């Protein structure tokens, strides 16, 4: 195999094998946690009305939005610093976790103040309860960032999955008759449970050995590194949940639930991209730090190919099967979820590409300029939301989201080509042909039994990939080597 054709997994050595295995573990644990989360949605939507679920959607959106602000870029900064300097994670955690707690407490105050201004008394109490999660989540994000920085992605994935399971366990008090407040209390408790487990994991792995203290020098270093990342995190918060919060303020709770559920169903499969993007950030950051720019380009191209293989068929399935999916998953009264789900689902593959492009931004040396691109994209999204949501509600928010995804992919492609000399490749003609074959089979079957349609679709896509040559034997061998942690 020539130097330019080397497999990036093999080229990177032991740390890349760890990242690849972490990615697969992340895929498995995220799959389980997403299934549990989807189970919560299914049960909850059959037990409460759209307006009742709208209350939960509002709290979850405000908490998630504020969590990004509370993090203040410290978790990716910890990942960045600890991945570039070996054995740095212990000093960072011991000397800087206090500032993460301060950010979390401040963000909780902001969340409650916002609720007092924007909502009625019941929702204010809901936000005050759910927002108790924010301080613990702020500290937890730094510990998880250190695990990522040390290449312990599999262990971080397990902790993240645990947090999702605790959130989903809110269905237990709901079934016991507590109403939506039970799940809101579970939302608040989840990061405290995850933090306790993450602390044990980090100490047993030797990532965090020392006691807590204030390290002024490392705090300054962390904040300097985190500042552009904090801006990026704030932009991510706006991108992920500004629309839900805006709908919750301007439209009835039923509309909030409609869009939030569509977004949750999208995210229930979008996470598959993290199986590639999480280890990719680790690989790109380490290779960039070592000056291996050819290795950066190889890993980026390989990640793009894997993400297209995952994202394109998912988009076809969600666009064509939105109505039967909603009918099968959600309770009566939630039929309106299908329209925004189909709209966003058709372009879901773009989110996979954005995740990959974002990993390259965070790994490189032009983070500040990358944040500026993100700010422009966020301005596009917020502007479209402000125009479309007041009139069109959930459907308008879905259109705004898709437009912002398309803009982001284009803008980041231009950015990386100019700053790093790395272009985001288009999907191959062979892969597009396989995807077209999939769509041609799913479309006439879209009104049939969902399970049968999914089985036929999966078989068709696999056969089309093989027939067109989009996937061959060496791809399967590479997957097996990833799972076994071996070099190719």
Image (tube, rainbow, N blue to C red):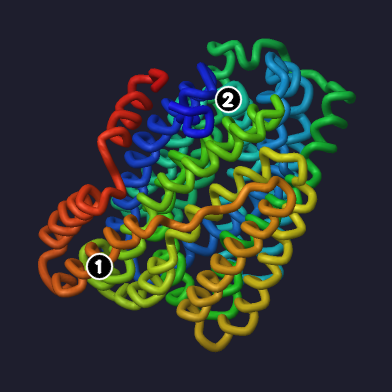
In the image, is 233 to the left or to the right of 201? right
- At 54% from the left and 37% from the top, the residue drawn is 298
Residue 423: x and y, percent?
60, 52
In the image, is 175 to the left or to the right of 21? left
Q: Nearer the viewer, residue 425 or 163?
A: 425
- Location of the N terminus (image quadrant): top left
Mark 1 vs mark 2: in front: 1
Number of on-image labels = 2
Q: Nearer the viewer, residue 126 or 259?
A: 259
Name above or below for residue 6 compared with residue 249: above
Residue 12: x and y, percent?
54, 23
* Residue 176 appears in the picture as rendered: no
Name the residue that disc number 1 marks. Answer: 439
- At 37% from the left and 35% from the top, the residue drawn is 29
Q: Nearer the viewer, residue 113 or 345?
A: 345
Name above or below for residue 404 compared with residue 228: below
Name above or below for residue 113 compared with residue 8: below
Distance from the alpha carbon under mark 1 to that under mark 2: 40 Å
| Element assignment for label 1 | helix
Kindly check if marks 1 and 2 are in contact, taking CB atoms under 8 A apart as contact.
Answer: no
- Location of the C terminus (image quadrant): top left
Looking at the image, tell me whether mark 1 or mark 2 is earlier in sequence order: 2
- At 70% from the left and 46% from the top, the residue drawn is 420
Number of other residues with Cα within 10 Å of mark 1, as a class: few under 14, some 14 to 19, many 20 or more: many
Name the residue that disc number 2 marks. Answer: 147
* Residue 97 appears in the picture as rendered: yes
């Amino acid at each position: 195999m020539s130097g330019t054709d080397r497999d990036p997994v093999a080229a990177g050595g032991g740390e890349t094998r760890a990242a690849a295995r972490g990615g697969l573990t992340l895929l498995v644990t995220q799959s389980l946690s997403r299934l549990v989360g989807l189970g919560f949605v299914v049960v909850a939507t059959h037990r409460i009305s759209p307006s009742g679920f709208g209350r939960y959607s509002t709290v979850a959106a405000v908490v998630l939005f504020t969590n990004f602000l509370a993090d203040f870029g410290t978790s990716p900064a910890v990942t960045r610093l600890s991945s570039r300097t070996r054995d740095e994670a212990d000093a960072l955690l011991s000397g800087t976790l206090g500032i993460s707690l301060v950010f979390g407490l401040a963000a909780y105050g902001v969340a409650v103040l916002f609720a007092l201004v924007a909502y009625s008394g019941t929702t204010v109490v809901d936000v005050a309860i759910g927002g108790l999660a924010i301080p613990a989540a702020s500290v937890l994000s730094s510990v998880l960032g250190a695990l990522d920085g040390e290449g312990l992605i599999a262990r971080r994935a397990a902790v993240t999955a645990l947090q999702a399971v605790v959130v989903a366990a809110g269905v237990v008090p709901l079934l016991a008759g507590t109403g939506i407040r039970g799940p809101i209390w579970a939302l608040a408790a989840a990061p405290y449970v995850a933090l306790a487990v993450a602390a044990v994991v980090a100490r047993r792995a030797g990532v965090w050995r020392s006691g807590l203290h204030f390290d002024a020098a490392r705090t300054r270093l962390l904040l300097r590194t985190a500042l552009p990342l904090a801006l990026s995190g704030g932009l991510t918060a706006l991108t992920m949940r500004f629309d839900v919060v805006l709908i919750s303020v301007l439209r009835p709770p039923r509309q909030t639930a409609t869009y939030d559920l569509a977004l949750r169903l999208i995210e229930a499969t979008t996470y598959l991209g993290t199986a590639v993007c999480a280890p990719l950030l680790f690989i790109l950051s380490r290779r960039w730090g070592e000056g291996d720019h050819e290795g950066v380009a190889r890993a980026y191209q390989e990640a793009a190919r894997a993400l297209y293989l995952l994202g394109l068929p998912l988009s076809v399935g969600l666009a064509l099967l939105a109505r039967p999916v909603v009918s099968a998953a959600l309770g009566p009264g939630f039929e309106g979820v299908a329209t925004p789900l189909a709209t966003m689902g058709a372009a879901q593959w773009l989110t996979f590409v954005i995740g990959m492009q974002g990993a390259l931004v965070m790994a490189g040396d032009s983070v500040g300029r990358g944040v500026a691109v993100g700010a422009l994209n966020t301005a596009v999204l917020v502007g479209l939301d402000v125009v479309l949501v007041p009139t069109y509600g959930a459907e308008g928010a879905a259109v705004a989201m898709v437009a912002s995804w398309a803009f982001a992919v284009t803008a980041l492609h231009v950015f990386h080509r100019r700053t790093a000399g790395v272009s985001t490749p288009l999907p191959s003609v062979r892969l597009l042909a396989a995807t077209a074959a999939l769509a041609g089979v799913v479309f006439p079957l879209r009104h049939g039994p969902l399970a049968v349609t999914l089985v036929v679709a999966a078989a068709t896509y696999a056969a089309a990939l093989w027939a067109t040559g989009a996937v061959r034997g060496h791809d399967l061998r590479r997957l097996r080597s990833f799972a076994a942690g071996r070099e190719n």
